[in-house]
Amino acid sequence: MNLKDIQNLIRFVAKSGASEVKLETEDVKITIKTSSGETSRETIVQQVPMGAMPTQTVIAPAPVEQEPTSPAKAETPEPSTDNYLEIKSPIIGTFYRKPAPDKPAFVEVGDSIKEGDVLCTIEAMKLFNEIESEVSGKIVKVLVDDATPVEFDQPLFLVEP
């Protein structure tokens, strides 16, 4: 089961209103718990070790409290953006412009990008997901601040094709 399948499962369970879902395959064991108030979700993904397969540990930063003004700021593009393409968030999570705090940002305003280039990471359920560009062009504007919560389908970047 790949990361996209897990993300789709999480979205499906969140929309379905189920309080708990367990899925177990040969190599993955997943438990998704949601509360009825939609305020907290818990997802446990456990990979069953297979022989001498190397493991990777990801240490996530502390959760960031969502400010009510953040989505409003990011959702109000400037009026002259008609000829630009928006790159939107494919998942809910915390947006990061850098792969690590001491590393440079993946992309800056003015950078040329092509399909497949990594633009940012979004942390969702303690997993860091690299967001790749589906278009080629030039970054015109970054619409979200670093370490800010983002919603599904929220615009992240403006790109001049």
Image: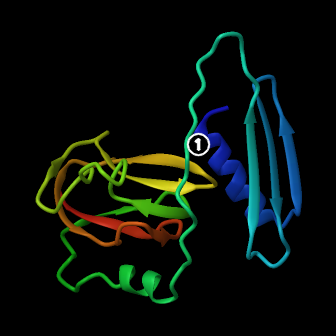
Q: Residue at x 84, y 40 (%)?
A: 23
Q: Quadrant of residue 12?
A: bottom right
Between 143 and 55, which is closer to the camera in this rendering?
A: 55
Between 4 and 35, which is closer to the camera in this rendering?
A: 35
- Residue 126: x and y in percent read 61, 52
Which secondary structure lies at badge 1?
Answer: helix
The quadrant of the picture occupied by the C terminus is bottom left
Q: Is residue 135 above or below residue 67?
A: above
The quadrant of the picture occupied by the N terminus is top right
- Residue 143: x and y in percent read 31, 72
Query: Which residue ends up furthest to the top in the rendered image?
Result: 51
- Residue 13: x and y in percent read 77, 58
Q: Residue at x 38, y 69 (%)?
A: 155
Residue 159 left/right relative to 9: left
Q: How is the image coloured?
A: rainbow
Q: Is residue 49 above or below residue 22?
A: above
Q: Residue at x 21, y 47 (%)?
A: 136
